[in-house]
Image (cartoon, grey):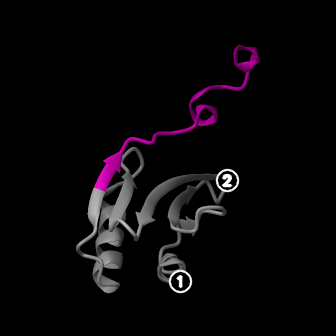
Amino acid sequence: MRTFIREWIKSVRQYRTHDYQRDTVCKVWNRGMGRLDLFRFYPEKKIVLINSAICNRADERHLDDFLRTFGMQDYDRKRVNYGYPVYYNHSFGLHLAA
């Protein structure tokens, strides 16, 4: 599975693998300065988890192509609104100090 993902993301400029979770595809922007989890594959359960907060139609098409190419059309798609970490939504200031 990890080999398939690594090969697939080479064809999509804005995708990278997650450094620690090899079955996770990240979407990058701002010339690589921002990165969030987009898809996570669970091969043993035949599930792909989709971060609906950042997934758009182009990402859906890329996922369709990936699943079709590698014979995984039977994978269930589960959507979660994983969203953005606090540092993407707040300004840096004293209100964040503990």
Identify the residue at horizontal 41%, vertical 65% (top origin): 42
What is the quadrant of residue 20 in the picture?
Answer: bottom right
Q: Which amino acid does the dot numbered 1 rest on?
A: Thr
Instruction: Pick whichever of labels 1 and 2 is earlier in the sequence.
Output: 1
Query: How many numbered marks appear?
Result: 2
Q: CA distance from mark 1 to mark 2?
A: 25 Å
Q: Which residue in the structure is indicated by mark 2?
A: 33
Q: Is residue 25 left or right of residue 62?
A: right
Magenta-drawn segment: 78-98
Q: Is residue 34 left or right of residue 49?
A: right
Where is residue 86 drawn, in percent x and y? 60, 31
As helix, strand or loop, the secondary structure at mark 2 comes to loop
Is residue 97 within the magenta segment? yes
Q: Which amino acid does the dot numbered 2 rest on?
A: Met
Which numbered dot is residue 3? 1
Q: Is residue 50 left or right of residue 36?
A: left
Q: Mark 1: give few (<14), some (14-19) or many (20+) Cα within 10 Å.
A: few
Identify the residue at horizontal 51%, vertical 54% (top origin): 37
Q: Nearer the viewer, residue 61 or 49?
A: 49
Q: Nearer the viewer, residue 78 or 32?
A: 78
Where is residue 98 drawn, in percent x and y? 76, 17
Tell which residue pokes out farthest to the left in this image: 74
Q: Mark 2: give few (<14), some (14-19) or many (20+) Cα within 10 Å.
A: few
